Amino acid sequence: LDDGEPDPDFDEALRLQRRATHFLAHKQYRLSVDEFSAALFLVPDDPVLTPQLHVGRAHALNGQERFESAKNDALMALKHILRDREEDASAAEAYSVLGKSLYYTKDYHGSIEALEECERIWKEHGRTLSVFDEAYLDQSREALDAGLGVDVADDKSVMSNGVKSVVSWAKEGKSLSNIPKLKPPRFVPREKALRAAPNLPPMPKAWPQQSPTSPSSIATGPERTVTFLSDNMGITLNRGTDGIVRVVGVVNLQPGSVILRKGKICAGDLVREAGGVDLRRPITATMWGDTVALIKMAPRPLHFIVAKEITSEFAESPTAAAGRRGARNRAEI
């Protein structure tokens, strides 16, 4: 095409990118991967759009727990960026998703390298790491200090040479031929994809028909905020017969854990807010089901406000209380 003439493939790739990003935001990772792949099929070598598509698909692949493929997409994005222009925000985004992919493959050393490169670029542009990247960087360092991670000597992937080595190859124009490509995109009819798109309502600020106040028998300690950064929150919640939501189980975080959260949360805590939804007042069983669904689908970071329960008519251990109230009011998240 002559300069200035419209490129139908490029325009279609942009449309596919928008759809893929929509599916990604709603955690429909398979559909997101399909749309990003279709866009890359149309625009395999654009200096700006192609890296964006690889980064987007890497995020979706991480959501599918296809971490090796996500790592390869991030490296392909860096290859295009560093070959064609100076490091910019797109490079920082590629390093960011690369660091997450390496973390999940237990290459904590590589994850640290990638996230430090991301941090360096953001600083050059007057920005800082996101709360997600800070959490992954901290967790990678803790895991490395604990002696965890893959044996780099036995790692046959391109990352056995370290992130910085791969970056230097890209800058020098060397081939990254050992990065495998995904299979060709599986095209989905537009009508089918549209039917599959969710219509998730926003998180409400409070449920209607709630009782006006909490039961007078409940007293709590100071409220505190807990921030969940990963989809897996590592907690079990229970709605009691009094309509109040309690924490009845908490997974202890170990170095290298896939669960990322900040703040203290304990079994026995009362959940006062979840993602801005007021849970200080009793909720019905129907509201409980909607609350669990919204918590699972809400974008991260997700903020909880919790408080220690000091006195209650349900003065028994959280585990025993949950068992007595039945599994239907319990949710592992």
Image (cartoon, rainbow, N blue to C red):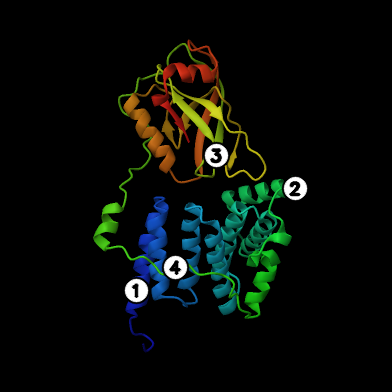
**Disc ID at residue 183:** 4
- Mark 1 neighbour density, 10 Å: few (under 14) some (14–19) many (20 or more): some
**Disc ID at residue 227:** 3
Sequence order check: which comes first, mark 2 or mark 3? Answer: 2
Q: Amino acid at mark 2?
A: Gly
Q: Amino acid at mark 4?
A: Lys
> Is disc 2 in contact with disc 4, using a CB cutoff of under 8 Å?
no
Sequence order check: which comes first, mark 4 or mark 3? Answer: 4
Image vertical order of residue 216 relative to residue 5, above or below:
above
Q: Is residue 162 visible?
A: no
The residue mark sitting in front, 2 or 4, is: 4
Sequence order check: which comes first, mark 1 or mark 3? Answer: 1
Please report the residue visible at 58 percent of the width from the left and 55 percent of the height from the top. 100
- Direction left: furthest residue: 191
Q: Amino acid at mark 3?
A: Thr
* Relative image position of residue 251 (x, y in whole percent): 58, 33
Sequence order check: which comes first, mark 4 or mark 1? Answer: 1
**Disc ID at residue 11:** 1
**Disc ID at residue 147:** 2
Please report the residue visible at 34 percent of the width from the left and 74 percent of the height from the top. 11
Q: Nearer the viewer, residue 320 or 141?
A: 320
114 lies left or right of 277: right
* Relative image position of residue 81 (x, y in whole percent): 56, 73
Q: For the residue labelled by badge 2, is the local secondary structure a helix, a strand or a loop?
A: loop
Q: For the residue labelled by badge 1, is the local secondary structure a helix, a strand or a loop?
A: helix
